[in-house]
Amino acid sequence: MNLSQTKIAALLVALAGAALHQGAAQSVTTETPPPGKVVAPGVRLIGSISHPRITESSGVAASRQFPGVLWTHTDGGGPKKQVLYAITREGSSLREFFLADVAIADWEDIAIDDQKHLFVGDIGNNDAKRSQLAVYQIDEPDPKSEARSVSPKRSWRLRFPNEPFDCESLFVWQGSGYVVSKVFKDSRAQIFRFPLADAKEPVMLELVATTRIESPVTGADISPDGKLLGLVAKSGAFVYRIDGDVARAGKGKPHQTKFRHESIEGCALVAEGLLATAESREIFLFTDPAFRWK
């Protein structure tokens, strides 16, 4: 190969490399962005709850059998608030079901498992006046069903290991339920466990982890694969890489997206990040890579 041929070959190699780089750049820039609009670094507003009776969305769970469906409820208790709502991620209403055959005192969160069950967290304890909490298991209804009510199939009464505390967060993982203490005055949030085995007597909560979160935690969820534990608090959203072991939340430092919003109450880990609902109707999505379990 003479000098001229060598220069031509080098030029062709350079052009091919440039074309490859340009194609890669185009593939990055043409990637579909997350939904909604940016309201803070790593936080997007993706919807607003439209149902007039969902006045304080306190908990949220993402369905694992009905794509795009969220389950939520209003904070509190009493017949008018014992309603399970199916909504879209944009906040549109799909269906509602009355929670029958039970009396709820303070419904603060909702959880889900891989066996098509939802878990109702009657766990609110304002001013620590309750000596026991309660959790109810229901079969996840079909949002297209004509049924008007659902009833608990199983229930658990929960006792405190020491002094009673307030609680607004519930999640379920591998045969156990978990609640998170809502602490104040810079105390650290703690995670407690109870077995999801049939029990006629009240079950004692077991301390699993003391986290580094010194802000009132109002919602929690675990990713379907158990790798991530997400929490929302008054100081923002947090995520722990636990790889199936909830106790790891007491050993490591979480990733935090600082976004102060006094009304955020519930959260659910979805493929795109950590979805959160606020009592003021907004639906947010925390999109930092640390929140994405897929």
Image (spheres, rainbow, N blue to C red):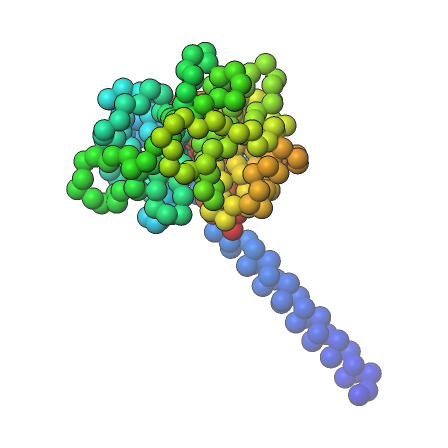
Q: Residue 288's quadrant in the figure?
A: top right
One can see residue 229 in this view: yes
Q: Residue 49, position in %: x, y?
A: 33, 31
- Name the residue: 56% across, 38% down: 246
Q: Farthest residue in the right direction?
A: 3
- Name the residue: 49% across, 18% down: 165
Q: Nearer the viewer, residue 293 or 252?
A: 252
- Name the residue: 61% across, 28% down: 210
Q: Is residue 103 left or right of residue 44?
A: left
Q: Is residue 26 above or below residue 118?
A: below
- Name the residue: 59% across, 37% down: 247
One can see residue 265 in this view: no
- State how many labels appear: 0
| Position of the N terminus by quadrant | bottom right
Q: Is residue 152 left or right of residue 211?
A: left
Q: Farthest residue in the bottom direction?
A: 1
Q: Nearer the viewer, residue 1 or 59?
A: 59
Q: Residue 100's quadrant in the figure?
A: top left
Q: Residue 108, position in %: x, y?
A: 39, 25
Q: Residue 248's quadrant in the figure?
A: top right
Q: Is residue 190 left or right of residue 143?
A: right
Q: Nearer the viewer, residue 31 or 166?
A: 166
Q: Residue 106, position in %: x, y?
A: 36, 21
Q: Residue 294, position in %: x, y?
A: 51, 51
